[in-house]
Structure formats: C-alpha cells, structure tokens
Amino acid sequence: MLTWKPVPADAAVVAPDERLSWPRTIGIGAQHVVAMFGATFLVPVLTGFPPSTTLLFSGVGTIAFLLITGNKLPSYLGSSFAVIAPVTGAVASHGTGSALGGFIVLGAVLIAIGAVVHLVGTHWIDVILPPVVTGAIVALIGFNLAPAAKNNFEKGPVAGIVTLVLMVAVLAFFRGLVGRLAIFLAVVAGYLLALAMGDVDTSGIKSAAWIGLPEFHAPTFHLSVLPLFLPAVIALVAENIGHVKSVSQMTGRDLDPVTGRALMADGVATVLAGAGGGTATTTYAENIGVMAATRVYSTAAYWVAATVAIVLSLCPKVGAVISAIPPGVLGGATVVLYGLVGILGVRIWLTAGVDFSKPINQMTAAIPLIIGIADFTWRIGDLAFTGISLGSIAALAVYHCMRLLTAARDRV
C-alpha cells in the first residue's frame, strides 16, 4: 500500500499513487505543513489547549487517515473550528477533560456514520440532512463565535486591524500558494508587530526546552456537555464529503467508495486526539488549495507533512511561541476565520441550489440562525443546550415538521 510510482519532475499531474523524486516530495510536504499551520495552531490557542499536543495528534491523525483510506485519498487532518464553541462551553463548566470526552463521543459518532455510509452510501444523509439543514447548522456554528472574535480583537485592536487587513490584502493580491497562506502570513506579521510593541509575553518562550514530549491530558465524561458537541458532527460530515468530492474532481478519479472510510478515519483521529489532549480534526481545505496550485496529489507528500508535524510537536519551544500569540492578533484572524465557517454554510446552500422562495427553506434557515447567533440557552437539570445545540435541533425540527405538514395538506 505504501508504494508510489516515480514520475519525472516535469509531469503535468502527479496522481495519489505517484510521486516526484523524494527531495521534491519532501518540499511539497513542507508546503502542506505551512498551509495547515496557520489554522491548525489557532484552535488550541483559542481554546487553551497545548499547541504541541494538537500538532502531534494532527500528524498521527493524518497517518491514521491515510492508512484507513488505503492511501488513496490525499488529505491532511488539522484542527476543526466547528468545535471551538462547544469546547469553550465545556471547559467553562467542567474543565479541559470534559472537552476531550466530548471529542471522543464526537469521533465515535463520526465512525458510526462512516460505517453506515460505507455500507449503504450517502443518500440517507441527504434525506435526514438536506442541504438547507446542513447549511443552516454549519452557518450558525461559525456565526455563534462572533462574540469570541470581538472579545479578542478589543484586547489589541492595532495588531488586530493589521492582521485583518493583511489577510484580506494577501488574498486579494496574490494567487496560488501565497494566497493560500494568507492566514499564516498575516498572523506572523501581526505577531511581529505585537512583539515590537511589547505586547508579547516571551517568558514562556525563553524557558521552554528545545526537545521534549508534548503535554498530555486525560478525558472525562459529563452528560451535561455532550449535547454541545453533537452539532459539530454535521459540520465534520459536510466537510469530509465535500473534501472527497473536491479531490475526486481534481484527480479525475471516482473516490465516492472511499467516503465512508474517510468519515471513519476522521472519527478515529478525533478519538485519538480526545484520548491524549489534542483537538478534534477535520480535512483541510488549505491543503486542497496546495494541491490545486501544484497539481501534485501524491499521498507521499502527506506522509511527509504528517511526519514533520510530529517532529515539530516534540519541540516545546515551538509550542511556546504559538501559545504566546497575543489576543489582538487572534482577534484579527478569527474575524475572518469564524466568518468563513459561517459562509461555508451559505456555500452549501448555493452549491445545492436551495430555493429560498419556498417557506420551508426560509424557516429552516431563519429560525436556527437567530437562535445560534443570539446563543439561546435552555437548561434541563444538568443538561445545557446552547445556541448551537438548540439551533441544530430547530433546523431539523422545522424542516421535517414543515415537510410532513405540507405532505399532509397535499393529501387532503
């Protein structure tokens, strides 16, 4: 399985089961690390998780993904932004361990969904979660995080504005790989500005060792926080299926039979991360961008990227540098990133051609978005249903109830 057919350096396209020379493959793999780095390290910094541990499990998760998918689907598994809101709620009520327990449950549900998809296909997902429902849930997950972006931004508005403006400028002016690295480049520039302004605490960087194991944490399980994580399953399913379709289109290969395995692999990676202290994973669009720019789809490059991530995780100095990113810089970056999570939901609507002239689609989108953005909360004993949970339930309930009522009306 771990064999690739060598192709010449001037090959127009490098397929998943092919590779360039190893020096060139290592170079492409390094590009994948840089591409995923900007978003992957932001999630642990924003949630208070150890960045080195997250890097370790992103590398381990990527290797697990490649093995489970039979080395057929080029993909890097980075940190998922869909879990930031539930993690924040879980940590506030029961500590870091409860969030890790939530990841394990989240991963287990994803594995179960992947197993069903592998056996019967994805049609049942389309019936239960049509695009109007999926888009609403993914959109409210992103927009629910708006207050968190605002809070960080206000702690360092100068660095935040510079980071935000640079991100937009790089995306607008540069094409190809440089444009895909807009997050990384903008955060580095904002970081350096904050450092020059004296807004970065460097004490932890100076005291950190160059070589050492990441910081591990054990999961705990609390029934009250589990509802926070279940809506994220929908986002992860949508991202994984979208990733498979994108890679299939780029490579000209039918990868639909691998979809179930891809979902199970992401679930396994998320369970592993939850067991040791990392964050939930998902397939990364940033790395799809690298493949689109280079036309190199070799899975060998992803093995290199995963190995580099694991090596970096064994350098506490790197983790300390990441942990020291000031809130203002994070605020500038997350204004864009959280908004993009929301826009991903809108993109699902557009891609599927959802007709918003129909009341059923209007209500399915409108009600959950308000619930999610306002962060409605409902407590039943120890169970706490926040805006994301309630909004997701509302999307499902509104759509299916209206569909049943409309069908009943038409039969009369």
Image (tube, helix red, strand yellow):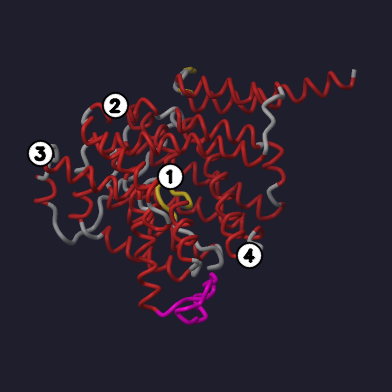
| Depicted 375 relative to depicted 207: above or below | above
Mark 3 lies on residue: 198
Q: Specify whether residue 20 is painted magenta.
A: yes
Residue stretch rendered in magenta on the structure: 1-21
Report how far apart the C-alphas of labels 2 and 1 lie in the structure.
Answer: 21 Å
* Disc number placed over residue 331 in the picture, else none: none
What secondary structure is marked by label 1?
loop
Closer to the chain start, of discs 4 and 3, is 3
| Depicted 11 relative to depicted 280: above or below | below
Q: Residue at x 56, y 52 (%)?
A: 263
What secondary structure is marked by label 4?
loop
Residue 380 in the image, given as x and y percentages of width and height: 49, 18
Q: Specify whether residue 136 is painted magenta.
A: no
Mark 4 lies on residue: 252
What secondary structure is marked by label 2?
helix
Please, what is the three-letter code of the amino acid marked with disc 4?
Gly
Q: Residue at x 36, y 33 (%)?
A: 335
